[in-house]
Image (tube, grey):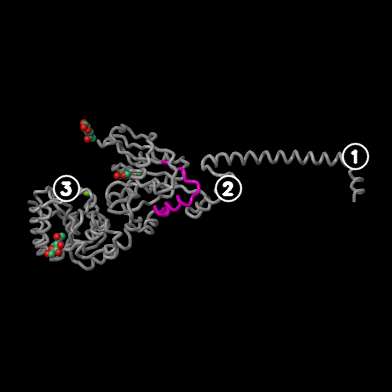
Amino acid sequence: MLKTQNQSICNPQQIKRIILFILYTYIIYLIISSISNTNEKLEKVSLSQSAGINDETDFDIIKHDEKVNLKYCGEKTCNFMFPYFIPEQETRANLHLRSLTFLAESLNRIMVLPNVGNSRIDCCTKFPFEFYYDLEKMKKMFPSIKFMTQQTFKEWTKELLIKPDTLHTWFIEDGRNDSYSIRDHNQMAVEPGVRYEKNLLSKLCINQFDLKISDYMEFHTGIGHVNDFEHKMFNFFTENLKDIKSPVILIRNRSRRQMFPLIEEQIPFAPHIMKQADEIINKLQSYYCIHWRMEQGILEKMPKCAENLIETINYLKMTEEINNVYLATDYPISGGKSASDTFYSVRKEHRIAIQMLNSTLNFNTWVSLNAFKEFRNDKKYDSEFSSSGIHGILDKLVCIQSDYFLSGPKDCCRIRSTYTRLISEERKDLIENGDNRIRNVITRWGKS
Ligand SMILES: *[C@@H]1O[C@H](CO)[C@@H](O)[C@H](O)[C@H]1NC(C)=O
Ligand SMILES: *[C@@H]1O[C@H](CO)[C@@H](O)[C@H](O)[C@H]1NC(C)=O
Ligand SMILES: *[C@@H]1O[C@H](CO)[C@@H](O)[C@H](O)[C@H]1NC(C)=O
Ligand SMILES: [Mg+2]
């Protein structure tokens, strides 16, 4: 053994070749490893900076998050737009939410649908979007847009190991003379926004999601009239947001002004609401729907308004031969607060008016018909039925389908209401489409 080794090593030609070979190999090894090293170092530096994690596991973490994204978005990266606060009550919020789908489309982002409750669309409320709306039908209505509910989005933020970088945007309507007037702009504008403190994030309920909010932007409508405002505003948003790399864009809307082009068709309501409405409609036919939103009526006139309403109904009973009455009102018929969370004080005059109707008309309401009994027997829904809520949607559907629709005249109620206008528009469509059960669009009952 020793002998043979000695023999080969002692050959000077061979030694030279071996040394050269080793040298070459070493040099090549050095070159290769230095290239891959710089790559690795670059990645590791940025990763551990952003996540503060151990080098060894970086690769696993990225792989993990890619898998999470694939599971939720069908792609290795997810891009969301989350309008987490929509202003106003259901009928108007429905309208705002559907015009926002334009933005989701132009930004090519998945639109996150907030929770609902007490007639609001807002991430602070406690029921999933599908408590009010039919998500499957909504997807068919907007086939080019992907939707995700707040719950699913929340799970996504929880499962990620590296929390998603987030841009917070705030849409502000200038010139409202409210507490934000100090920020008013004369023209459409975008500027860096103030950073939100912990308690504000918690008040807005955004802290329930695991987000890394790194940037704040404020969009301003500008004061005053601009021709073709909706399209200009929409383009302005798109231009300013389309290159944003953050996976999440949060949108807080404080603007009541129509910012985006209108979409006529409503977001369709949940099957359990439609079913409940059908039951009532079939049971009452033929019936009047009386829509009496007392909130902004003149208090002293309430009893007189009730008297006039009774007269009108008694007259119609002779001419129309319809006997059943369904009353849709913001008066707290279920004994709780009023059906509008801005209708603060129910007074003696309101009570007298309702008692007058109750003693002469024998009216039906969602309460007397025991609507949504499965929800109302469940404590979880107490808050929903104690003021405005899902029954407001039911009232709307029952009034749209009523044989005869009556609403209050000036002084008895709020006249300019989107809710009332929507009911009459839907009835007009039904009549135009040949539904001859519907006898009128809207009639204001007799004035004093
Ligand atoms: C806002 O308030 C100021 C002063 O209080 C008043 O002069 C101005 O007309 C108001 N603007 C609007 C749009 O109401
Ligand atoms: C905000 O609400 C207004 C109407 O009140 C609506 O036109 C606008 O599209 C909404 N914008 C966003 C971003 O929610
Ligand atoms: C109407 O009267 C009946 C009994 O007379 C009562 O049970 C019901 O609560 C009244 N409805 C309203 C809305 O006051
Ligand atoms: Mg109100």
Q: CA distance from mark 3 to mark 1?
A: 109 Å
Q: Nearer the viewer, mark 2 or mark 3?
A: 2
Q: CA distance from mark 1 to mark 2?
A: 49 Å
Q: CA distance from mark 2 to mark 3?
A: 62 Å
Q: Which residue is more in the foreground, 67 or 420?
A: 67
Q: Looking at the image, tell me whether mark 3 or mark 1 is earlier in sequence order.
A: 1
In this rendering, position of residue 221 left or right of residue 43: left
The answer to whether residue 104 is visible is yes
At which x and y percent is residue 282? 23, 67
At which x and y percent is residue 276? 27, 64
Give the residue at x 8% y 58%. 311
What residue does disc 1 label? 12
Name the kind of residue labelled 2 in the image: Thr
At which x and y percent is residue 95? 31, 49
* Label total for image: 3
Q: Are marks 2 and 3 in contact (CB under 8 Å)?
A: no
The answer to whether residue 320 is visible is no
Q: Residues within 10 Å of mark 3 (few under 14, many from 20)?
A: some
Which label number is shown at residue 57? 2
User: Which quadrant of the picture is home to ligand 2?
Assistant: top left
Q: Which residue is more in the foreground, 295 or 57?
A: 57
